[in-house]
Image (cartoon, grey):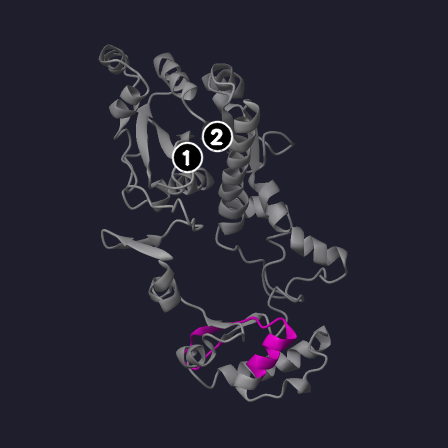
Amino acid sequence: MGPLQGFRILEFAGIGPGPFCAMVLADLGAEVIRIDRKAGPPGDRRDFTGRGRRSIALDLKSPHAIAAVLRLVEGADALLEGFRPGVTERLGLGPDACLGRNPRLVYGRMTGWGQDGPLAQSAGHDMNYIALTGALWAIGRPGERPVPPLNLVGDYGGGGMLLAMGLLAGLLSAQRTGQGQVVDAAMVDGAALLMAPIYAMKARGRWGNQRGSNMLDGASPWYDTYECADGRWLSVGPIEPQFFALMCDKLGLDSNRFPDRMEPASWPALKAELTAIFLTRTRDDWAALFEGTDACVAPVLDMEEAPAHPHNAARGTFLARDGVVQPAPAPRFSRTPAEPGAPAALRGEHTEAVLRDAGFTTAEITALRDAAAI
C-alpha cells in the first residue's frame, strides 16, 4: 500500500545514501526496481536498506543492456543514481538520453560534492562532506578532536533523505506540468542545510566559535549526558525553564538557586552538581523516576535495548522479520499506511519478471541472454 503506490522508480545499485533513499520510497509504496550490475555482489537478505524492491541484473557495458534500460525508463516516473558526475552520460544513460525517452522523468543524482564545483570528481565519504560544512567541527568536547556522528548527517540525513524529498518534489511538479527534470542532491549541500538552525544561532551571537562551549553541543548542564551508578547513561535536556524546574524538583533541588542558568559562566558548577547526583543511582532507577514527565530526561539505550523499550514497542518503531530486528517505515499515514516490503532481493532475482512487465517478449529476453546482457 503506501501513499506512493502506482509510482515506478528505477534505482541504479550503489552504496549508502542511494539505497537508503530507495528504501524510503519503497516503504512508502513506490514500485522500485533496482538495476544491479551483472557481475556485482550476490546480495544479502539482511540488508535492510535493500528491502521492498525487485532486482534486475544487467551488463551496463553492453549496448543491448543500455537499450533495455532505456525501455524501462519509458515506463518510469523517476530514476536515481549515485555515480560520480559524468558516468551515466558515458554509459548512454545520462539525463539527456533518459529525458529524451521520457520527458516526464524525474532524474535524481546522489553525490557527495555535487555535479559541479572544484571537488565534483573527487572521492569522499560522509565525514569529508560534513567536514566542509562546519557540522563535523561543531560536534565534540572542548579541547578534543571532532567526533563523527556515525554517517547519519552526510549519507542519510543530508544525502538519502534529501534526495527522497527532491524526487518527491520533482514528481509533484511533473504531475502538474508534464515535465520532468534533474535533481542534483549533494551530501555537502544537505549537511549544510541541516546546519541552518546552528548558523542562525551563530548569526544572532548565540553560538561561539569554540567546540563544546554552546547550549546544544554538550557544554550546558541541561543538555548533556550523565553517567549513572551502573556505568550507563542518561540524556538530560530540559532547556525550557518549566522543564528545568521540574527536573530540579525530581532531584530534590531548588531551581531558584540557578537564576543565571543560561549564562555559560554558571555551567561548570551546575554540571558538577548534576554529575555527582546522577552517579548516586542506576540509569534505570532514574529512568523510572522521570519517565512520562516533562523533565526531558531519558535513558541512553543501546541497539539491543532500544527496540524493546515500551514506547518503541507500542508504536512499532522497530519490527522483527525472520528473527532479525530492523527499523520500521516512517512516517505514519492515516489512510495509506507505509509497510516494509519484501526482504532485500538477490542480484538479478527478478530480471525476467521485470522485463516481461515492461513488455519484453520471450524472444527479446532470449536475445538479451544470448548477448550476455543479462
Q: Which one is in front, 337 or 312?
A: 337
Asked which quadrant contains residue 348, the reply is top left
Dot 1 amino acid type = Gly
Question: Under tag 1, what secondary structure?
Answer: loop
In the image, residue 299 lies at what x, y percent? 44, 72
Q: Which one is in front, 7 or 213?
A: 7
In the image, residue 364 lies at what x, y percent? 27, 11
Label number found at residue 243: none
Around disc 1, counting alpha carbons within 10 Å, would you say few (fewer than 14), some (14 to 19), or many (20 or more)? Answer: some
Which quadrant holds the N terminus?
A: top left
Q: Name the residue tied to disc 2.
A: 83
Q: Residue at x 39, y 66 (%)?
A: 311
- Does residue 353 appear left or right of residue 334 in this picture? left
Q: Is residue 243 magenta?
A: yes
Q: Can the viewer see residue 84?
A: no
Is residue 184 shown above or below 45? above
* Mark 2 or mark 1, earlier in chain: 1
- Does residue 30 appear left or right of residue 104 in this picture? left
Q: Can the viewer see residue 107?
A: yes
Decide: marks 2, 1 in contact (CB < 8 A)? Answer: yes
Total number of numbered labels?
Answer: 2
Asked which quadrant contains residue 237, the reply is bottom right
Q: Is residue 71 magenta?
A: no
Q: Name the residue tied to disc 1.
A: 14
Magenta part of the protein: which range? Answer: 227-248
In the image, residue 155 lies at what x, y percent? 50, 44
Question: Under tag 2, what secondary structure?
Answer: loop
Dot 2 amino acid type = Phe
- Does residue 16 appear left or right of residue 134 in this picture? left
Which quadrant holds the C terminus?
A: top left
Q: Residue at x 59, y 30 (%)?
A: 115
